[in-house]
Amino acid sequence: MSFDSLGLSAEILRAVEEQGYRDPTPIQQQAIPVVLAGRDLMACAQTGTGKTAGFTLPLLQILDSQKAAPRSGRRPVRALILTPTRELAAQIGENVRDYSKHLNMRSLVVFGGVSINPQMLKLRGGVDVLVATPGRLLDLEHQRAVDLSTVEILVLDEADRMLDMGFIHDIRRVLSKLPAKRQNLMFSATFSDDIKALASKMLVNPAYVEAAKRNTPSELVDQSVHFVDRKRKRELLSQMIGEGQWQQVLVFTRTKHGANHLAEQLNKDGITASAIHGNKSQGARTRALDEFKNGKIRVLVATDIAARGLDIDHLPHVVNFELPNVPEDYVHRIGRTGRAECTGEAISLVCVDEHKLLRDIERLLKFEIKRIALPGYEPDPSIKAEPIVNGRQSGGRQGQGGRPAQGGRQNAGAPRSSSGAQNAGRSEGSPWGNKGGKSSDSRGAGNGAPRSSKPRSENGSSQKRATYSGSRRSNTTGE
Ligand code: AMP
């Protein structure tokens, strides 16, 4: 199927072509006609499936083909796209700009963590498509900087994450500000009971589309587990990066502190690295991401929530420096690589504390991840497991684009609520029908809780240096 057959306008098709997309992805094939027909939509689709264009392209077309109701004053907000995180908001905003470049359409992205005044100023100029995180949107609404009563189309993106992050009250408040008559599009990687409940309140006679099987990591990702003592993880990581000559590695830690500490240590090892997490200013996060994308730094160390929304083309290596507490987050994490027909490598460094987490992950995957033992890094059997504390950090999800959670999950260190528990995963295989076009994307998942470990003291051992081949590419997703 080609884009031409989906009923999109020439201007939009031109923009799509300029993005290098040749064929619509399965979710685009299913969602675009439904949205163009004006129906509400419930789409089960993970990031990486092309879902953003799946809702943005028809939304733009509808807005472009129907004139806004004449109103005095500023240009009304006609489409509202709600997202859980700043990064995701920024990326969707970029997509909206790209796809609408040949249309007379104004779009704006608003999220917290940056000054509200420029956003108010821009809103005063009039905006057709507003991409927002819920907390900042409500602040703007409260200050009467935005009028939501004119919204014709509402998109709730990554709805499962929104619920996980405790945004349900904010979402309800936003919904109460919208006109009753509108088109609603809801996207979620999972279809839990909480999501169903929200969908039944929000959607009217929706069409249901699903992109791919859930909880199935891409077959293009070569997954492996290295058992290693907790205090030797950093040394092993530095060696793998150095000897494998990896130039772009996304590394996950469970905590913000752990991310900072690891980035510092890698820099000391001569490997350029930055940390990205919710305590960093938006400027620092954007800078780190830009430097990682353009190759100025080799390693980006991230917590799960901070990594959510990262869109990095052809990311070749993902390392779980610490396993996530929630097995579904493993699938999200490794979904950053092996995208769009590019192979990728996902390596987990697993210490004795994490054996149970690994078992949980493998139960979810339904296969055992390949084990790799590097000579010189064999775990010391005398080291006993230490508990991983599921502590909660104060401050809620501030810094992730929202306001402090009200009873919601503040980070994913804690056991997950039913929403998002079962099915968070990535699409199976590549969603693309071709090799053309832009490829990869990345989005992450819930943040990690602080663990009990003290800052890692390195043993500085320079024992036998195992040779690490950085070009392992055989595909072993198990089964
Ligand atoms: P998404 O799942 O919306 O986050 O999109 C993932 C990535 O796929 C982004 O980098 C998009 O630019 C890209 N993309 C979206 N649609 C297509 C398509 N039809 N062909 C190739 N790449 C696409």
Image (cartoon, rainbow, N blue to C red):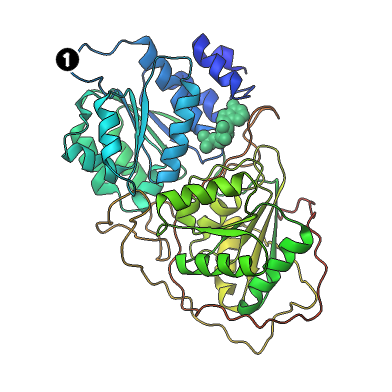
Where residue 296 appears, as percent x and y from the top left, is 63, 50
Where residue 203 appears, as percent x and y from the top left, is 31, 31
Residue at position x 69%, y 67% in the image: 238
Residue type at the position of mark 1: Ser
Q: How many marks?
A: 1
Left or right of residue 393: residue 244: right
Where residue 412 appears, as percent x and y from the top left, is 42, 61
Badge 1 element: loop
Quarter of the N terminus within the rendering: top right
To which residue does mark 1 refer? 72
Ligand 1 appears in which quadrant?
top right
Can residue 362 be seen by looking at this rendering? yes
Q: Residues within 10 Å of mark 1 (few under 14, many from 20)?
A: few
Left or right of residue 399: residue 6: right
Residue at position x 40%, y 22% in the image: 59
Quarter of the C terminus within the rendering: bottom right
